[in-house]
């Protein structure tokens, strides 16, 4: 398992995402209400770039005839066929036990010189700013 | 030694006489005067006008196998003759009876309700609560029209609780896909009284009903071939509208609408659910997963490919062992004979479930 700095915290504000290529993998890193999540940028359906889809909410499972909107900002819809995935755990909404996308841990850490990865851009950061670190 | 031989003979004889529950047996009055006797005016006189499918009446000139009963009436009008021609030769333990009424050809909901009520009374008096049913072989359907669900519920309530009325029966010809919520009072009543719902081919696309094809087919052969399109529409409607989420106790049987289209239609629906679940958030699992718990299919008309292995495989693909129930559609021209519908490569277990066990459980017989 390796850790990679993705960007400065200030460069990934809530509601935004960054798609990075690391170790030959394309991964989407998301800031959802100041929590950070990462999922593989590959839809399990047709292997297309899932993380380029719309980040949205979803109608929650409901009583018949009722629509209850929820999970705003926590759901991504594949840009191709519209399949819904939970960014928090990678599970598809339609069949969470059988269809899911890989997830990765993301942490926010203070700047430490030795954390910086040769393969990603290095940044001038202040001590107050942290870095978003992806563990794959 | 002789004991063992006797046992073998017994087993053989049991095999030959596999018990059958026939889920679709049709009956008719000797004369429509029998039905009119139950009708109020002005409906009694109105009922002279027309009975049938209009432009898609059967061009054979008859809807049934040919012949009259020894008592002189039309076929399937004499309980004793029906026993001789259908019940005994096929070892039928229970026959679920329904007259073919076609009330849904009409547009007037009160007229339809009166016709159905008259037929239900006739079924009750002549077939169920009569000495002809001395052994209880006859069970029957409460026929209702869906156009005015409140009238349908009233009719269900007239008969619910009668031990021999075992299901509610709808014509698949309708003005809208039958899963839609305007029809739900009927399903609520079915659930409340523990009555399964049967949907049967009737006046599909005719009279006051919506077309289910593009425009009108030209001929009967085309219309009858295409009727499964209407059943597909109803099934998809039930699944997407969430009828089985709303009425988890509801069970339904589809009669004469075909079965081998089922996997293709369910694969398509499941695939689209993955993209459009947000439209129907009350559907909480892949739509196909509701079928086994709630829906059964009558076997008639049973179609067979030339290759028996293909047939066996098709039955496996649709999970026939768990979702099919034998129906003869006696005495109609396309009736199926129980002993003839399966080739030899179909297992006894599957046959026993389809001929007997599935219906026994479905109807709580």
Image (tube, rainbow, N blue to C red):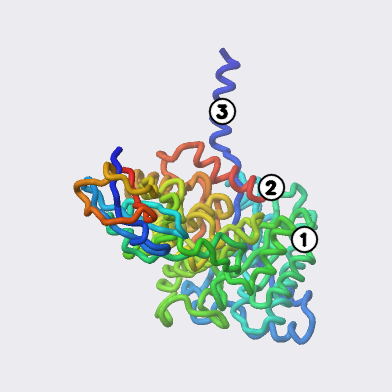
Q: Earlier in the sequence, mark 3 or mark 1?
A: 3
Find out whether the residues at labels 3 and 2 contact each other: C-beta distance under 8 Å.
no
Q: Which residue is at 66% across, 73% downward?
A: B145
Q: Which residue is at 42% across, 45% downward?
A: B316
User: Residue A105 placed where, x, y %?
Assistant: 38, 45
User: Residue B78 placed where, x, y %?
Assistant: 68, 60
Q: Which mark is residue B364?
A: 2
Dividing the picture into quarters, in which one does residue B91 lie?
top right
Is A19 above or below relative to A98? below
Residue beneath label 3, please? B11
Q: Label 3 is found on which chain of the structure?
A: B
Q: Label 1 is found on which chain of the structure?
A: B
| Element marked by disc 2 | loop
Have a look at marks 2 and 1 and say if they share a chain: yes
Q: Which mark is residue B275?
A: none
User: Residue B175 placed where, x, y %?
Assistant: 56, 78
User: Residue B331 placed where, x, y %?
Assistant: 57, 61
Residue beneath label 1, please? B160
Q: Label 2 is found on which chain of the structure?
A: B
Q: Is there any visible trace of residue B66 in the rendered image?
A: no
Mark 1 surroundings within 10 Å by alpha-carbon count, few (fewer than 14), some (14 through 19), many (20 or more): many
Q: Which residue is at 72% across, 81% downward?
A: B110
Mark 2 surroundings within 10 Å by alpha-carbon count, few (fewer than 14), some (14 through 19), many (20 or more): few
């Amino acid at each position: 398992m390796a850790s990679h700095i993705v960007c400065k915290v200030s460069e990934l504000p809530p509601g935004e995402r960054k798609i990075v290529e690391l170790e030959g993998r394309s991964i989407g890193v998301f800031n959802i209400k100041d929590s950070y999540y990462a999922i593989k940028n590959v839809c399990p359906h047709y292997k297309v770039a899932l993380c380029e889809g719309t980040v949205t909410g979803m109608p929650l499972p409901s009583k018949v005839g009722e629509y209850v909107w929820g999970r705003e900002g926590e759901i991504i819809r594949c840009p191709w066929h519209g399949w819904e995935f939970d960014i928090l755990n990678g599970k598809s909404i339609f069949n969470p036990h059988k269809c899911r996308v890989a997830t990765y841990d993301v942490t926010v850490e203070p700047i430490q010189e030795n954390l910086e990865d040769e393969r990603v851009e290095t940044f001038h950061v202040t001590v107050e700013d942290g870095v978003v670190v992806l563990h794959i | 030694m002789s004991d063992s031989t006797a046992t073998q003979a017994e087993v053989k004889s049991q095999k030959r006489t596999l018990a059958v529950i026939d889920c679709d047996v049709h009956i008719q009055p000797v004369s429509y005067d029998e039905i009119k006797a139950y009708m109020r005016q002005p409906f009694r006189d109105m009922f002279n006008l027309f009975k049938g499918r209009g432009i898609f009446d059967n061009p054979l000139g008859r809807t049934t196998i040919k012949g009259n009963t020894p008592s002189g009436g039309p076929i399937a009008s004499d309980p004793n003759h029906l026993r001789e021609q259908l019940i005994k030769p096929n070892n039928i333990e229970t026959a679920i009876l329904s007259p073919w009424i076609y009330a849904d050809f009409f547009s007037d909901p009160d007229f339809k309700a009166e016709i159905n009520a008259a037929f239900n009374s006739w079924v009750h008096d002549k077939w169920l609560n009569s000495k002809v049913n001395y052994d209880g072989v006859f069970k029957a359907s409460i026929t209702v029209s869906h156009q005015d669900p409140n009238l349908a519920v009233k009719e269900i309530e007239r008969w619910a609780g009668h031990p021999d009325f075992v299901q509610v029966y709808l014509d698949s010809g309708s003005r809208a896909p039958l899963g839609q919520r305007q029809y739900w009072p009927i399903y609520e009543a079915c659930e409340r009284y523990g009555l399964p719902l049967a949907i049967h081919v009737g006046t599909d696309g005719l009279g006051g009903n919506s077309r289910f094809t593009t425009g009108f087919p030209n001929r009967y052969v085309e219309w009858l071939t295409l009727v499964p399109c209407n059943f597909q529409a109803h099934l998809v409607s039930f699944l997407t509208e969430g009828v089985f989420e709303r009425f988890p106790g509801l069970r339904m049987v589809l009669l004469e609408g075909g079965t081998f289209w089922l996997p293709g239609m369910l694969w398509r629906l499941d695939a689209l659910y993955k993209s459009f679940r947000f439209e129907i958030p009350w559907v909480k699992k892949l739509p196909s997963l509701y079928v086994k718990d709630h829906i059964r299919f009558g076997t008639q008309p049973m179609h067979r490919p030339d290759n028996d292995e293909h047939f066996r495989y098709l039955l496996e693909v649709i999970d026939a062992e768990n979702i099919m129930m034998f129906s003869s559609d006696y005495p109609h021209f396309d009736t199926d004979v129980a002993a003839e519908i399966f080739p030899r490569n179909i297992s006894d277990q599957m046959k026993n479930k389809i001929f007997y066990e599935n219906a026994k459980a479905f109807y709580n017989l």
